[in-house]
Image (cartoon, grey):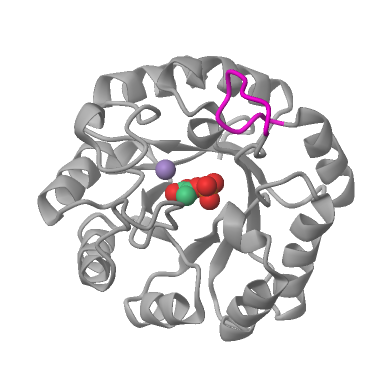
Amino acid sequence: MEKDKKIIIAGPCAIESKKQFFSIAKEINSNIDFLRCGVWKARTNPYSFSGIGLKALDWVQEIQNKYNIQCAIEVGTTEHVQLALKHKIKTMWLGARTTCNPFIVEQISNCLKNKEVEIWIKNPIFADMKLWFGAIERFKNKGISNIKVIHRGFFSEIKEKYRNPPRWDLLVEFKKKYPKIPLICDPSHISGNKSLIKEVTNQALKLNVSGFMVEVHENPENALSDSMQQLDLIEFKKFLSDLK
Ligand code: PEP
Ligand code: MN
């Protein structure tokens, strides 16, 4: 791998239908390292679209085989983990809300004990680094060494331009403590709006992050979640070429 080559994780915020998912996978699989697949969505509002759930796992498995690509899903419960394993999904991430809950992190890490999986841990929703470190330690203690972390910004009560303002200073702290864990930036959830993705990406590049997780949708205006922040295919191509 080229020294400066960034890890690219991309895909829709959520799988919305078989057609939508197969189409986006076909379009982007050859340009990315991991396909992000939202199967269960942890929505703040219980009346919002919360993902297709179980049925979508068959589609994820099919796409993994079809393109020989690693698909990654968010898991929030031990049931999610067991279903993912059953469908041969070996890359899973903890969302920002899950990282905040030591009980659930403990349960999920136990469920994955000594399994050959890769786990990504998003920063907790608020800037308590100890929660992030604690989650990492819980997985390490269970024999899982294939860990990446994702910076998706932190909740702020003050309304400002970013949906979840980044804290680059805390990432410097993070790198000191865990210099070997790859740090991925999620400019989509930091920005909340695609017009800001480029500037957030440039800030992250200055910190020499290992890669990016980006939301891509063929028709973002009509996406069932996070429609403002998802790049369309042309914008995603541009994002990739700008990185080079
Ligand atoms: C996501 O990546 O789909 C997501 C919900 O993000 P976060 O956990 O960062 O809010
Ligand atoms: Mn999203």
Main SS type for the magenta part? loop
Look at the image and tell me whether residue 244 can be seen: no
Residue 175, x across and y down, in percent: 82, 42
State the residue at coordinates (63%, 64%).
146
The picture quadrant for ligand 2 comes to top left
* The N terminus: image quadrant: top right
| Left or right relative to 97: residue 225 | left
Pick the residue in front: 154 or 47. 47
Please state the extent of the stretch shown in magenta in the rendering. Answer: 157-166
| Left or right relative to 113: residue 172 | right
Pick the residue in front: 182 or 224. 224
Residue 34, x across and y down, in percent: 42, 49
Look at the image and tell me whether residue 4 can be seen: yes
Residue 195, x across and y down, in percent: 44, 15
Q: Toward which corner of the image does residue 202 lie, by quadrant?
A: top right
Q: Toward which corner of the image does residue 225 lie, by quadrant?
A: top left
